[in-house]
Image (cartoon, coloured by chain):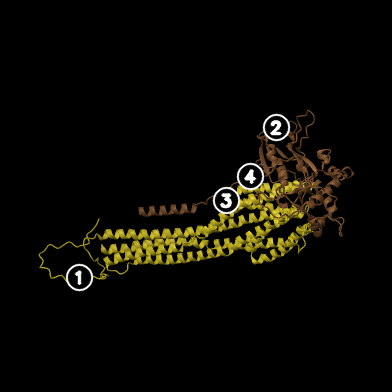
Chain colours: A brown, B yellow
Amino acid sequence: MNTRWKLSVVASVVAVLLAGCGYDDTPVPEKPDEPPPPSAAESECDTVESTLESYDPGIGVPTGPTIERILRDHKLVVGVSADTYLMGSRNPETNRIEGFDIEFVRAIGEALFEDTEDGFEVGRDIQFRVITAGDRIPLLGGPDAEGEKHPAELDLVVRNFTINCQRWEQIDFSAEYYHATQKVLLRAELEETYNGTQSLSDKKVCAPIGSTSLVNITDPKLGGNPDIEVVQATNHTGCLIKLQQGEVDAITGDDTVLAGLAAQDPYAEVPPTCEGDQVEGCQVPITDEPYGIGVPKGQEDLVRFVNYVLEQMIIEDGGAEWRRAYNRWLADPLGPGDPPELRYGR
Amino acid sequence: MTQSAAAPPAVQQAPPPPAPAPQRRGFWPAPTGKPVGAGVEDTPSLLNRLQIIGMTVVLLFGLASALIQFLSYQSDGRAADDTEQLVRVQEIQSSLLRADALATNAFLEGGDEDPEKRGEYDDTIAVVFEQIAEAAEAQSADRDALKALVVVVNRYANYVAEARVYNRQGFPVGAEYLSVASDSVRTEAQPILGNLVTANTDRAEDSMAGQHPFWLLLLGLVVLGVLVWLNLLLAQRFRRYLNVGVAIAAAIVVVTTLVAAIAAWRADSTNDGLLDDELQVAIDESAARTAGNDAKAYESLRLIKRGSGGTYEPKWEDAAEIVEKKADSSSLDEWEDYVDGHRQIATLDDDDQWFRARNIAIDEAATSPTANFDRFDGATQAVVTENGTTTTDELRSGRTLALIGSLLTLILGFVAAVAVARGIGARRKEYA
């Protein structure tokens, strides 16, 4: 009897154990690693004054194989930003893309199509493609991040696009239409004591993924600070979200872009450029960022026509058209501005 | 106290023994009721041993068979819970994507969102939180993953709220908040939900394979073999072909085994059927609903990020492929109606006729793409609910019977043990 009882007890225990067997916990996926901060690219050429030289505009007659194709299709495909407030962004009220860059797109479209049979209509003749900074060169037929080239999908890129010698090897540029500089935007409480990038030691500074702005701000040769902790976001507006959520202390980028970010948040400030002996509460621009309009390599006829339009805006009537655009979009946050000098020589 | 099976020799002068008659040695001894082959064997001790062996074997049979049936009963219960949790987790996935599709579509209207659409989004995101809470309550093994999920969904909801506020003020950071929120659903929430779906699918499949007709049959055969062997030993010694007690025990074992094995086999077949049919339909339809809402959100995002068809259309195509592969024919018609409208939106957007594309995308007329999509969403949800409920109901329906069977087997095991004890006890009495 004793043995039987023991057997019963063992069987019951086994049953209870089996019944109580729990499941393994569902695994929680680990967060993906942050992309590594960009390193300074080895440049085989130097960006000098002559880099800003583009093709002579001629007399503005729309001829050439590229222009003829565009006129035949009655469509100019332009890559723009839709989230760079004041430069190129979607107005939620009207749902239209507007900004300083967009003024140049309209001027080029109008000059191209106004004399055609059907005239010019923005919505019909200009096809806006919203692109990221990383799309600019690949969509113009230049190499992508992996070095692969694809057929050009855009006729122009007007999206705060800095002219430099490396890019000239991949695509063509118009003459410079705006001279921006790289600066820093801060949380408001940091502005008063800010005296250059040395104030940002151990602070988190954000810029878009792969942006050269992050390389510049940590490069001591350019007045940067290697002790800055760099954080990356998809774009500058993504950086503003991180600033608002307290994940970063500052954002670096072109002054035009930063002005647009500061206009959306009363607690974000771009310290003004230092003047005279002023050292606190102001900043010295880190780099110059001359903006040009990107064109696929080899389409000189289109570059010349774009330069002709720029000349009309920047030189005619003392640059009245350029000033009208500047005053409408950038004069408030950036102060008075003048058009850049147009350079040709290619 | 033991007794010798041989009678003590008489002390007398016996005439010389006649030549020994040739002994008959057959397989079955003559049915005299007296022990045969009597020699030096300790019969009472042997009977005790046989009694213990017989009782132990049938008791163990009763316990083991009842245990196997009890585990199957528990397994079906777990299977019902696991499939319910699987459907619940998939519904979280679908609801979250549905919320994203609603949020992105409402955003297209500009700063002044339609309060009805906003309300629909608010209701859907509230459902997501409720479903997460229910899932955490239902399965403790999912709690860590659900904790991580609730953090992501909470941030998603906050970012959508920020997106609305900034959109009303006319700031593009609003669109970025929405874009980051949508992205977090796909890059952060989806991997967690993917793990939850995989884990619960594995659990449901394992639980549904908890019926063991083969083991029940094998156990019965082994025990039956032991009882036959026991009967043979007794028959050899007591000239009875059949020990009644052992025979009753054997009959109990045979009947119990057959009934239990057939019941387990039928339950196993039913579970296989549920796994291949109703549950599979629920899983596929849920995946179709998730992918459909994913596609609808991509359609809105391509319009929010105006002219970004090159980025979002391939993602829409991938999601559409999943819908076409997984959706039940009853919901596929609605999907195809929506697809026609989507193609129109995409073509207009590609031609930069953005306003026309946007107007079609937010149109709510009965034949608009959004209305067709809503019908698809409703149809898929109905299929998921119906098939999920059928699966869990079926799994739970036969459980009481299985529990009764398990208890009955245990009792019958004891009855069989008593039968063996009495059967062998009768032989002992005869011998005494």
- Tell me, yes or no, whether dots 2 and 3 are on the same chain: no
Q: Nearer the viewer, mark 1 or mark 4?
A: 4
- Which kind of residue does numbered mark 1 sit on? Gln
If you read the primary sequence from the N terminus, does the residue marked by circle 2 or circle 4 appear first? 4
What is the chain identity of the residue bearing mark 2?
Answer: A
In the image: residue B106, left or right of residue B419? right
Q: Nearer the viewer, residue A33 or A66?
A: A66
- Tell me, yes or no, whether dots 2 and 4 are on the same chain: yes
Task: Tell me the CA gap for discs 1 and 4.
Answer: 97 Å
Name which quarter of the figure residue A227 lies in: top right
Name which quarter of the figure residue A291 lies in: top right
- Which kind of residue does numbered mark 4 sit on? Pro
Judged from the image, the secondary structure of the residue bearing numbered disc 3 is helix
Which residue is disc 3 drawn over? Answer: B142
In contact (CB < 8 Å): disc 3 and disc 4: no
Task: Tell me the CA gap for discs 2 and 3.
Answer: 46 Å
Which residue is disc 4 drawn over? Answer: A35
Task: Tell me the CA gap for discs 2 and 4.
Answer: 25 Å
